[in-house]
């Protein structure tokens, strides 16, 4: 296009000046123009470097947008140093060291200007300039789209950066622009960037997308305020804050981010209000370093596409979530490292594939009036120094409600766990914790399961409808003398109420409540589920290891289990003969010692596993023979890499003994998706191969589920020599268990009581909740309680009165 002419319409009233004039160049027209004049540029290409130093209007012809091109060979095509108006022009620059449109002074208006350039910046605003830029477009694949520097400002309305080789909008040096309804996309750097002390960026109704860097980046003491903005489809983090940055997001939407949706570090502060964060590949909120803080109010974080926690707080940072929702994520909230803290108030954490709240490495979390639903684990306090408070929270439909391990010491107040598949509250490995006024209902396992002599405090707690029992206290081999839970005023809907641990009377101290009718009788043994981690006899130096004959004698003394006893004896005989053949210099048949136990709960699987380990130790096959019982929650981690570590730790604890994996089928759920159970299985198979003589592994669970588990994991199935099925107890066998219990506790069955018990056990439903040996024990304890209530009315009861149990002492049939 050839260069045209420029018509200048003069506004001056001096007689010697013409009202209009025609000029052959823009430079000549600008030289002739005065403040208020209008310069109308004819269509054409102008290879000039223009400088506007008066308050004039420079525009293209009406009705021909894009027909005027200002395109010099180098340098700055258009510089504005006055409160001028520039409208309907195309500006094209080629100088990588200079901007295409430079605003240095005044309050000019730039309207409908299109900048197509390969310059250092498409539009650059400096110093005290305060332009108003409306409906302008910047296409600059070589540099910054819009740069506001050195105290500059201005308002950018309905502008668009369609391409930028660096940041879409860059603010630094104390500049402070405002963006309204702008679109920034296809930038190779950050979409919006603000850096440096006193630099500030305000954006309202803007959209940032298709950015190769971060969507929004605020660093070096800069501040930014975004309202009603969208940030999405970046290749790096959605929002990045670093080094004392301050950002406010209100009514914003951050989504489709492959990395962290929001990442804060180095004393940065973020405030989010009514903002949604979704479809992120790593963390929704990632908060690091002392002094770094995020405050989120009425926000929603959901629909993660990766395998990372939705909210990550570490290295001494702080996060506050008030009235927020976090859902459909692998993990909801992870708080790590001493000094890190999370405060969550009136918020919902739901549809969490792994752990809703994880606190570790000395961190603290406080949750008040929160609701946790549909998670594998509600809250997990992991290790020494980690703690905090859960107050007035509800935890619904989880695998395990709350876990406390390895010296963690939280306070759980007035919380309710409803319908957990496993334990409501689970404390192990020296975990502590105080549970005050808590409640567990409808548990598929125990209400409160405290093992390893953990110094847990339970006060005014209540359990209802727990399949395995309201309270279970068990000691591991590392339990210190005098350790164990402290229990006060706790109740259960079980007939016998709270049952303290039988192995050590001092493990439970009660106030204002009897420890239970059978609490003072140590050494009670039943065929029900044994403690989660039991110490075998060989671990106690003051007691010599028993011979295999003595252990087999104890096995024979168990009620029922005839087929199980035959299987164990046959396997033991094979191992013993093989050992003797080796001693005689003969080849011994290879015997796979790993076993599969199938059957319903309460059929003695754990008891037999413990005895099997002791037998192998007596034969010299295992070094210790102790039992370490674990389940899915002990093996499967919450994020990539943690499962292998946890499985290795469990295997190491079992070294020299038996690793008993209860409900092993849970490691391979039918709808596994992103589940880490497969990683646990793969790790376990490798460890079994690498250390085949160090540990015996027994996997256990319901018969049908275990058959499915083995069929879908041929690598696991090939490691086990045989499957031993534990049948449900028949009524006469349940009667024998009650008779054994009565004999051990110096009670007798009155005439007719045995027949009544047979009828009772025949009539009792044998559904999934049926406890087998546990049901027999609970029945006996219920009879003792009813007997006590009856005999307590006698003024001077006889010995028969004190020892005889009658049919009337039987509980009502369920």
Image (cartoon, helix red, strand yellow):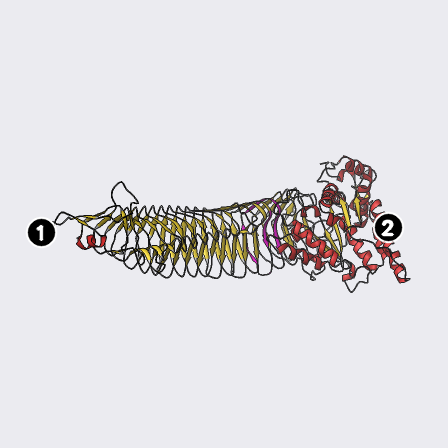
Is 390 included in the stretch rendered in magenta? Answer: yes
Residue drawn at point x = 81 percent, y = 41 percent:
735
Is 393 included in the stretch rendered in magenta? Answer: yes
* Mark 1 vs 2: CB contact within 8 A: no
Q: Where residue 797 sits in the image (x, y, percent)?
A: 77, 45
Q: Nearer the viewer, residue 374 or 527?
A: 374
Q: Secondary structure at mark 2?
A: helix
Q: Where residue 642 sits in the image (x, y, percent)?
A: 62, 55
- Residue to which mark 2 is pinned: 570
Q: Is residue 175 left or right of residue 733?
A: left
| Label 1 packing within 10 angstroms: few (<14), some (14-19), many (20+) | few
- Main SS class of the magenta portion in the image: strand
Q: Secondary structure at mark 1?
A: loop
What range is drawn magenta here? 376-405
Which residue extends farthest left?
15
Label whose residue precedes the other's in the sequence (1 or 2): 1
- Residue to which mark 1 is pinned: 16
Q: State whether residue 415 appears in this view.
A: yes
| Label 2 packing within 10 angstroms: few (<14), some (14-19), many (20+) | few
Q: Nearer the viewer, residue 227 or 466?
A: 227
Give the label, 1 or 2, closer to the camera.
1
- For the image, the number of numbered tags is 2
Q: Quadrant of the C terminus?
A: top right
Q: Is residue 673 left or right of residue 781?
A: left
Q: Where residue 719 sits in the image (x, y, percent)?
A: 76, 51
Q: Is residue 83 left or right of residue 213?
A: left
Q: Where residue 365 sits in the image (x, y, percent)?
A: 53, 55
Which residue extends farthest front?
2
Q: State whether residue 504 appears in this view.
A: no
Marks 1 and 2, how far apart in space?
125 Å
Which residue extends farthest right?
584
């Amino acid at each position: 296009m050839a260069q045209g002419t420029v018509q200048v319409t003069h506004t001056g009233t001096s007689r010697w000046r013409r009202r209009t004039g025609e000029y052959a160049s823009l430079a000549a027209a600008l030289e002739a123009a005065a403040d208020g004049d209008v310069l109308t540029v004819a269509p054409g290409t102008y290879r000039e470097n223009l400088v506007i130093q008066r308050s004039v209007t420079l525009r293209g012809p009406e009705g021909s947008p894009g027909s005027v091109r200002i395109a010099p060979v180098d340098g700055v095509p258009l510089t504005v140093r006055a409160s001028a108006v520039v409208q309907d022009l195309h500006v094209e620059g080629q100088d990588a060291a200079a901007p295409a449109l430079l605003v240095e002074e005044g309050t000019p208006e730039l309207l409908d200007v299109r900048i197509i350039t390969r310059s250092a910046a498409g539009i650059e605003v400096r110093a005290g300039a305060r332009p108003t830029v409306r409906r302008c477009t910047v296409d600059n694949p070589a540099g910054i789209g819009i740069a506001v520097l050195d105290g500059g400002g201005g308002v950018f309305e309905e502008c668009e950066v369609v391409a930028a080789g660096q940041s879409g909008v860059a603010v630094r040096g104390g500049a402070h622009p405002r963006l309204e309804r702008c679109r920034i996309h296809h930038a190779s750097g950050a979409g919006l960037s603000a850096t440096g002390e006193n630099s500030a960026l305000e954006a309202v109704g803007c959209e940032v997308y298709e950015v190769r860097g971060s969507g929004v980046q605020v660093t070096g003491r800069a501040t930014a305020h975004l309202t009603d903005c969208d940030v999405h489809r970046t290749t790096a983090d959605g929002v990045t804050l670093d080094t004392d940055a301050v950002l406010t997001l209100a009514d914003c939407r951050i989504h489709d981010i492959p990395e962290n949706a929001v990442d804060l570090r180095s004393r940065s502060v973020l405030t989010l209000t009514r903002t949604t964060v979704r479809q992120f590949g790593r963390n929704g909120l990632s908060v690091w370093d002392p002094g770094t803080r995020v405050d989120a109010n009425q926000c929603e974080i959901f629909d993660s596409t990766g395998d990372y926690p939705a909210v990550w707080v570490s290295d001494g940072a702080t996060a506050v979530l008030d009235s927020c929702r976090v859902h459909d994520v692998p993990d909801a909230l992870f708080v790590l490292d001493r000094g890190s803290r999370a405060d969550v108030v009136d918020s919902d954490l739901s549809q969490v594939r792994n752990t809703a709240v994880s606190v570790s490495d000395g961190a603290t979390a406080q949750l008040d009036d929160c609701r946790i639903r549909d998670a594998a684990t509600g809250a997990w306090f992991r290790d020494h120094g980690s703690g905090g408070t859960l107050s007035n929270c509800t935890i619904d439909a989880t695998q395990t409600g709350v876990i406390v391990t390895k010296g963690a010491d939280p306070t759980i107040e007035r919380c309710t766990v409803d319908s957990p598949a496993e334990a409501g509250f689970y404390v192990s490995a020296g975990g502590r914790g105080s549970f005050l006024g808590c409640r567990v209902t409808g548990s598929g396992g125990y209400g409160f399961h405290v093992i390893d002599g953990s110094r847990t405090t339970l006060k005014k707690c209540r359990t209802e409808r727990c399949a395995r029992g309201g309270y279970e206290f068990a000691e591991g081999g590392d339990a210190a003398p005098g350790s164990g839970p402290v229990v006060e005023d706790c109740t259960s809907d079980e007939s016998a109420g709270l049952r303290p641990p039988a192995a050590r009377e001092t493990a439970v101290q009660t106030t204002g409540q009897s420890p239970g009718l059978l609490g003072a009788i140590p050494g009670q043994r039943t065929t029900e589920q044994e403690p989660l981690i039991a110490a075998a006899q060989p671990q106690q130096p003051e007691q010599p290891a028993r011979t295999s004959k003595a252990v087999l004698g104890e096995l024979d003394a168990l009620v029922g289990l005839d087929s199980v006893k035959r299987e164990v004896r046959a396997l033991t005989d094979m191992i013993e003969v093989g050992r003797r053949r080796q001693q005689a210099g003969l080849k011994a048949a290879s015997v796979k010692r790993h076993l599969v136990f199938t059957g319903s709960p309460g059929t003695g699987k754990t008891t037999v596993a413990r005895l099997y380990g002791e037998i192998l130790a007596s034969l010299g096959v295992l070094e210790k023979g102790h039992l370490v019982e674990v389940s899915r929650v002990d093996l499967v981690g919450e994020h990539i890499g943690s499962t292998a570590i946890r499985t290795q730790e469990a295997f190491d604890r079992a070294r020299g003994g038996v690793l008993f994996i209860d409900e092993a089928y849970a490691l391979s759920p039918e709808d596994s998706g992103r589940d880490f159970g497969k990683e646990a299985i793969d790790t376990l198979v490798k460890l079994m191969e690498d250390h085949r003589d160090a540990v015996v592994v027994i996997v256990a669970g319901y018969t049908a589920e275990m058959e499915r588990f083995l069929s879908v994991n041929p690598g696991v199935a090939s490691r086990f020599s045989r499957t031993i099925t534990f049948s449900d107890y028949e009524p006469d066998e349940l009667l024998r268990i009650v008779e054994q219990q009565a004999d051990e506790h110096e009670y007798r069955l009155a005439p007719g009581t045995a027949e009544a018990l047979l009828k009772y056990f025949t009539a009792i439903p044998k559904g999934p909740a049926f406890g087998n040996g546990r049901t027999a024990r609970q029945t006996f304890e219920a009879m003792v309680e009813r007997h006590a209530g009856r005999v307590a009315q006698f003024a001077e009861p006889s010995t028969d009165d004190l020892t005889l149990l009658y049919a009337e002492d039987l509980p009502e049939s369920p």
